[in-house]
């Protein structure tokens, strides 16, 4: 099954929340299946201003070209990166899915969160790195989960946390560097994906009849 998603008139939404979410689910599945699609921006994209890192020269020196906000990242043909796509309904009631042993990793590198968008399962380890050697702060902004608000001084290279409840999408910010923004979705299942610059996503292993 293939789905192509075009998103119109999204500039204001990007400014307000810094993310877009496309929720999809297969309607007819006869066996374990995959959903594939491409997310594109429909319309004239707004001009993205370069990030001003003058306040943190250590990070500015890491970049050889101006860094743009990742709230809107487009590829060839206006394909959209950093879009979290997930199954929002239709999964077997009461089914439990194993939590991956490997962590989801967020790196603070060049005063940019890498990756910008990510998904994680409830109870899965969220590993946070500080590759810059400067003071950072990880401040999650959930409405359902407890907030994680921790300083990462130059000597703190790593930290971990988990999220206890499902929560579709919320933002992450750095209180030290206001241009640093990311977003994450917390799910009770593994059926989510994040688009790359080609706008493509794949969600595999869906249960028959989903």
Image: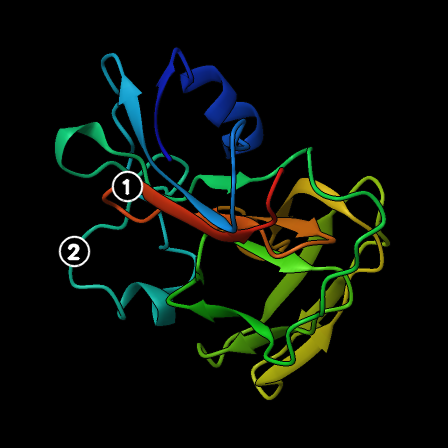
Q: Is residue 89 left or right of residue 82?
A: right
Q: Is residue 152 left or right of residue 95?
A: left
State whether residue 129 is above or below residue 50.
Answer: below
Pointer 2 residue: 65
x then y, percent, for residue 130? 52, 77
x then y, percent, for residue 71? 41, 37
Q: Residue at x 64, y 73 (%)?
A: 100
Let me know if residue 85 appears in the view: yes
Q: As drawn, which residue projects farthest toward the front?
A: 30
Q: Earlier in the sequence, mark 1 or mark 2?
A: 1
- Specify the quadrant of the image occupied by residue 208: top right
Q: Residue at x 68, y 40 (%)?
A: 168
Q: How many marks?
A: 2
Tell me the quarter of the image containing the N terminus.
top left
Q: Secondary structure at mark 1?
A: loop
- Specify the quadrant of the image occupied by residue 150: bottom right
State whether residue 109 is above or below residue 205.
Answer: below
22 or 18: nearer the viewer? 22
**Cα separation between marks 1 and 2:** 10 Å
């Amino acid at each position: 099954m293939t789905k192509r998603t075009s998103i119109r008139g999204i500039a204001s939404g990007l400014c307000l929340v810094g993310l877009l979410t496309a929720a999809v689910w297969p309607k007819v599945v006869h066996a374990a299946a995959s959903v594939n699609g491409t997310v594109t921006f429909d319309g004239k994209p707004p001009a993205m201003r370069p990030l001003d890192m003058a306040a943190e020269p250590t990070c500015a020196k890491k970049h050889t070209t101006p860094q743009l906000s990742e709230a809107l990242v487009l590829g060839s043909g206006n394909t959209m990166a950093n879009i979290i796509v997930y199954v929002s309904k239709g999964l077997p009631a009461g089914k439990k899915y194993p939590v991956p042993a490997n962590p989801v990793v967020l790196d603070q590198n060049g005063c940019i969160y890498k990756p910008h968008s990510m998904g994680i399962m409830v109870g899965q380890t969220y590993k946070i790195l500080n590759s810059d050697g400067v003071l950072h702060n990880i401040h999650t902004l959930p409405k359902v989960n407890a907030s994680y608000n921790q300083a990462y001084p130059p000597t703190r290279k790593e930290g971990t946390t988990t999220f206890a409840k499902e929560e579709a999408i919320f933002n992450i910010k750095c209180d030290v560097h206001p241009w640093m923004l990311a977003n994450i979705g917390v799910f009770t299942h593994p059926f989510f994906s994040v688009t790359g610059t080609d706008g493509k996503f794949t969600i595999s292993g869906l249960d028959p009849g989903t």
